[in-house]
Image (cartoon, rainbow, N blue to C red):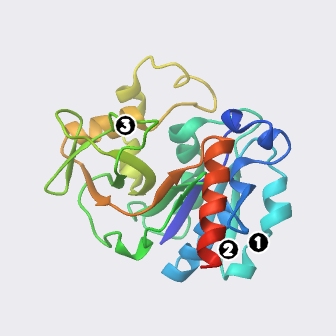
């Protein structure tokens, strides 16, 4: 299985920390955020990871190299000076994710600016539909959640809803007829296209093609300097416990 790490964002809410360092390369607990993912991916047996880049893109290969130190092969999907958002970024990286593999083989996706104690080995090896998303309890900054989880299926409506963690398994079928599904959405007509995966995931949920599971453990969306500081303090304290 291959994996994709979203690392192209501008990190505007993290400034001034991200003026000179991409957010996934910021450190917490003595490791860069992206390194926590790479270590887990290597332990899972993933051998090839695609990192999408835009803001301060050269720093990723300069810092991470080819991935050999983790026993991985790192490849970089450069999106240009303007990030393509999650949907456009994933679409842009599909050729690398599908190279030398089945067109419908699932691939693991993780946001580069999150930290979790989740064991990636708990993700299902097989699932029906277009994607399987890991959900977490709603954090203070996102109290209303994203999806309702019912018997392994995700739904757009009704309560209670949980928050998408930024970790999931995807298939390229999520992008079947994506232009039709997005319609006149802003960015969809650009070259290259720039759009979010959210409308496609919503459509997959409506069609019964979106499954999910719940992680009740630790998870942090490192979206502000304060959250990064809190995470760093917690991880450093745990390392010395």
Q: Position of residue 121 (x, y in %)?
A: 40, 76
Q: Nearer the viewer, residue 221 or 55?
A: 221
Cα separation between marks 1 and 2: 6 Å
Q: Are marks 3 and 1 in contact (CB under 8 Å)?
A: no
* Residue under label 2: 73
Alpha carbon of mark 3 to alpha carbon of mark 2: how far?
29 Å
Q: Do the residues bearing badges 1 and 2 touch, measured as CB atoms within 8 Å? A: yes
Q: Is residue 210 above or below residue 232?
A: above
Earlier in the chain: of badge 3 and badge 2, it is 2
Estimate how packed mark 1 is, as few (under 14), some (14 to 19) or many (20 or more) residues with alpha carbons within 10 Å: some
Q: Is residue 124 above or below residue 142?
A: below
Residue lying at 75% horizontally and 38% vertically, measured from the top left: 80
- Mark 3 Cα within 10 Å, few/some/many (few <14, many 20+)? many
Residue wearing tag 1: 66
Q: Secondary structure at mark 3?
A: helix
Q: Which mark is residue 200?
A: 3
Could you tell me which residue is drawn at 52 percent across and 19 percent down?
Answer: 186
Mark 2: secondary structure: strand
Q: Is residue 64 left or right of residue 223?
A: right
Q: Position of residue 208 (x, y in %)?
A: 18, 45
Label 1 sits on a secondary structure element that is: loop
Residue at the image point whose x is 40% and y is 26% from the top: 182
């Amino acid at each position: 299985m291959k994996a994709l790490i979203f690392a192209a964002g501008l990190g505007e809410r993290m400034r001034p920390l991200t003026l000179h360092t991409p957010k996934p390369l910021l450190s917490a607990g003595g490791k860069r955020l992206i390194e926590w993912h790479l270590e887990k991916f290597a332990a899972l047996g993933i051998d090839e990871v695609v990192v999408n880049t835009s803001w301060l893109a050269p720093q990723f290969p300069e810092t991470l190299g080819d991935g050999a130190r983790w026993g991985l092969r790192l490849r970089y999907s450069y999106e240009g000076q303007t990030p393509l958002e999650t949907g456009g970024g994933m679409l842009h990286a599909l050729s690398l994710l599908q190279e030398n593999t089945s067109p419908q083989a699932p691939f693991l996706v993780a946001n580069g600016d999150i930290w979790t104690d989740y064991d990636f080995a708990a993700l299902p090896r097989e699932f029906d539909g277009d994607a399987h998303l890991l959900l977490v309890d709603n954090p203070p900054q996102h109290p209303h959640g994203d999806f309702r989880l019912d018997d392994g299926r995700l739904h757009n409506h009704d309560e209670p809803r949980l928050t998408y963690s930024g970790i999931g398994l995807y298939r390229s079928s999520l992008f079947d007829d994506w232009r039709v599904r997005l319609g006149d959405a802003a960015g969809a007509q650009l070259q290259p296209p720039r759009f979010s995966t959210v409308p496609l995931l919503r459509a997959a949920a409506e069609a019964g093609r979106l499954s999910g599971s719940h992680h009740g453990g630790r998870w942090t969306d490192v979206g502000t300097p304060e959250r990064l500081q809190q995470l760093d303090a917690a991880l450093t304290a745990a390392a010395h416990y």
